[in-house]
Structures are given as structure tokens and as C-alpha cells.
Image (spheres, helix red, strand yellow):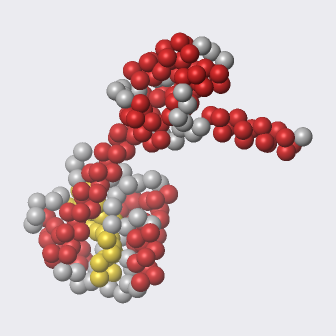
Amino acid sequence: MHEMVFVIDDDVSVREGVAELVESLGFRVQTYSSAEEFLQNGPHPSGCMILDVFMGGMTGLQLQNRLMKAKVHLPIIFLTGRGDIPMTVHALKAGASHFLTKPVQEPELLTAVREALASARLANEERAELDHIHRRFQTLALRERQVMAFVVSGCLNKQIAHEMGISERTVKLYRARVMQKMAVQSLADLVKQGERIGIGDPRKSKHDQAQQSSTRG
């Protein structure tokens, strides 16, 4: 996957100046004069964005919100000539990588680009790993998923056997299959995978269901 630095600014001199600077370090760059133009030319490969806050039409902050809703993961470096603290805090809380004031200093911008691209690479690796875990989990049979849920919740084989109404030997067989299919070598690794994909305690689910039934009654 090719990394790209997207420069979006309605000021042509700023846009071209930033693009030339970033390209001088060997990064690939695409420029856009508006947020709308950027959206019309998607989808976009991995990389980061250098985005003006105040533009005609859709603002940089509005584009950030649009991308968040669409689950487009591109670190954003905001540039503005008239930013303020509340705006900066809002942008950073919404996931912006950096918030820089124009005229930006070259070392500051280049450091921000390097950090944003490193962040993008790490995020892509984490998403790919999470996707692998989900795919492996989908290969588990229903009973294997149930056993994994109990194991991740810290239950012993004896407790799992009691909860599921099966023998401890059968629980061990299911556990072995789960470890193999999830491609883990240790219980700790299995627990980490379960936590990453949000497997909850099945005993808690039963308790919640019982409370709901009691409330309705």
C-alpha cells in the first residue's frame, strides 16, 4: 500500500508551497483546492492529510467529521492562520494528529508529517491484525466460541463444564481446538485476543437476561 500525503488548502500559494516542501523529502503528494474535491477523488490510499481549517465550502473540521463517520483512517495535520484553543482541543479530541499555525515552520511541518505517517502505519497494522483475529474467530463452531468466552472470562475447566452441561474432558477438547484455530500458544495470548474483539463474560449475559425477565414479570 503506497503512502500519500494529501494537501488540501484553497490558498494556491500555501498548497503548492507545502506540497513542494513535502515532496522534497521524497514523499508522494496529491493536492486539492477544497474538501469537496478531495472527497470526489476517493477512495484514498494509506497516508496522512495536511488540511486547512478555514476553506470556502466545507471546512477542514467538517471534512474531519465526515471522514470519521465514514471510518476513513487518515491522520490529519491541521493548518490555520486563525486558530484558537477551543478549536485546537476539539480537533485533537476528534483524532487530529497535529494542529499547526500558519506560517508553519518547515522543521515543525516535516516532523508532523513523519509522525503522522508513522501513526498511520501503526494503525493499519493494528487493524490488519484485528481483522485476522476476527477471521479466525469466525472459523470457531458455536460450542468452541462458548468455551473461548468462558476461558477468556477466567473460568476453570470445571466451571465451564458445569455452565455448559458437558464433561471436563469435552471442555479440554474444545479448548485445544480453540487454541489451534485462534493460532495461539498460551492462555494469555488467547485472553488478549478475546479482549481485543470484545468477547464478554457469558455468565454476565445470563445474569442480565434473568434480570430483564424478572423486571418484565
Viewer-closest of 197 and 47: 197
Q: Residue furthest right?
A: 217
Residue occupying the point 70% across, 35% down:
206
Position of the C terminus by quadrant: top right
The answer to whether residue 101 is visible is yes
* Spot occupied by residue 160 in the image (x, y as percentages of width and height): 59, 24
16 over 202 or under it: above or below = below
47 over 82 or under it: above or below = above
The answer to whether residue 141 is visible is no
Viewer-closest of 193 and 16: 193
* Spot occupied by residue 115 in the image (x, y as percentages of width and height): 24, 63
Viewer-closest of 3 and 135: 135
Residue occupying the point 18% across, 70% down:
110
Residue occupying the point 32% across, 85% down:
81
Q: Is residue 178 left or right of residue 23?
A: right
Position of the N terminus by quadrant: top left
Viewer-closest of 64 and 108: 108
Q: Find residue 132 and report its image quarter.
A: top left
* Spot occupied by residue 102 in the image (x, y as percentages of width and height): 27, 83
* Spot occupied by residue 35 in the image (x, y as percentages of width and height): 38, 67
Q: How many marks?
A: 0
Q: Is residue 198 left or right of residue 28?
A: right
Residue occupying the point 82% across, 38% down:
213
